[in-house]
Image: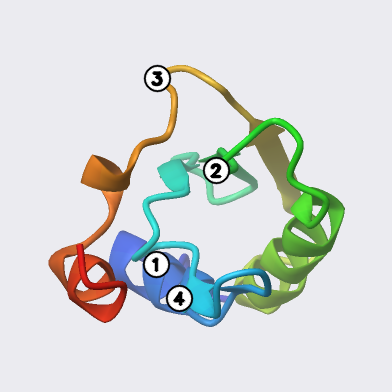
Amino acid sequence: MEKPDTETLNAALRRVIDPEVGMNIVDLGLVYGVALSDDGLTLTVDLTMTSPACPMSELIFDEVDAALRPLLHPDAMLDINLVWNPPWGPERMSEHARQHFGW
């Protein structure tokens, strides 16, 4: 199995939609980092939520796992971390997302 590149991983993450706002987590700026080890056996994804009280975080984590798992070697470990620093703000959103929400 070929090791996926960053573009492929981000494309998969764009299929994960935050159900509260109907926008993908990449354009919302919720993905803080994606790092695949040199051997391709550990993928670390750092995510945040728009607020600590987000009721959809577990659902989003499950969707991230479902989107990325097929791209990885069967023995690979997927480590999804919830991070709060730096705090999320609308400035992290893509231009597309800001225009969508009229910001």
In the image, which is nearer the foreground, mark 4 or mark 3?
A: 3
User: In the figure, is residue 82 to the left or right of 86?
Assistant: right
Question: 98 and 64: which one is in front?
Answer: 98
Marks 1 and 3, how far apart in space?
A: 20 Å
Question: 5 and 103: which one is in front?
Answer: 103
In the image, which is nearer the foreground, mark 2 or mark 4?
A: 2
- Number of the label disc, if any, that sits on residue 50: 2
Closer to the chain start, of discs 1 and 2, is 1
The residue labelled by disc 3 is 86
Q: Is residue 2 visible?
A: no
In the image, which is nearer the foreground, mark 4 or mark 1?
A: 4
The residue labelled by disc 4 is 14
Contact between marks 4 and 1 (CB within 8 A): the answer is yes
**Residue 56 position within the rendered picture, expressed as x and y whole percent measured from the top left:** 79, 57
**Residue 54 position within the rendered picture, expressed as x and y whole percent measured from the top left:** 74, 45
Q: Secondary structure at mark 4?
A: loop
Above-or-below relation of 71 to 29: below
Closer to the chain start, of discs 2 and 3, is 2
**Residue 98 position within the rendered picture, expressed as x and y whole percent measured from the top left:** 22, 66
Inspect the image, locate mark 1, and give the three-letter code of the amino acid beneath it: Asn
Closer to the chain start, of discs 4 and 3, is 4
Above-or-below relation of 80 to 59: above
Contact between marks 2 and 3 (CB within 8 A): the answer is no
In the image, which is nearer the foreground, mark 1 or mark 2?
A: 2
Q: Secondary structure at mark 1?
A: helix
Q: Is residue 82 visible?
A: yes
In the image, which is nearer the foreground, mark 1 or mark 3?
A: 3
Marks 4 and 3, how far apart in space?
A: 21 Å
Closer to the chain start, of discs 2 and 4, is 4
Closer to the chain start, of discs 1 and 3, is 1
User: In the figure, is residue 17 to the left or right of 56?
Assistant: left
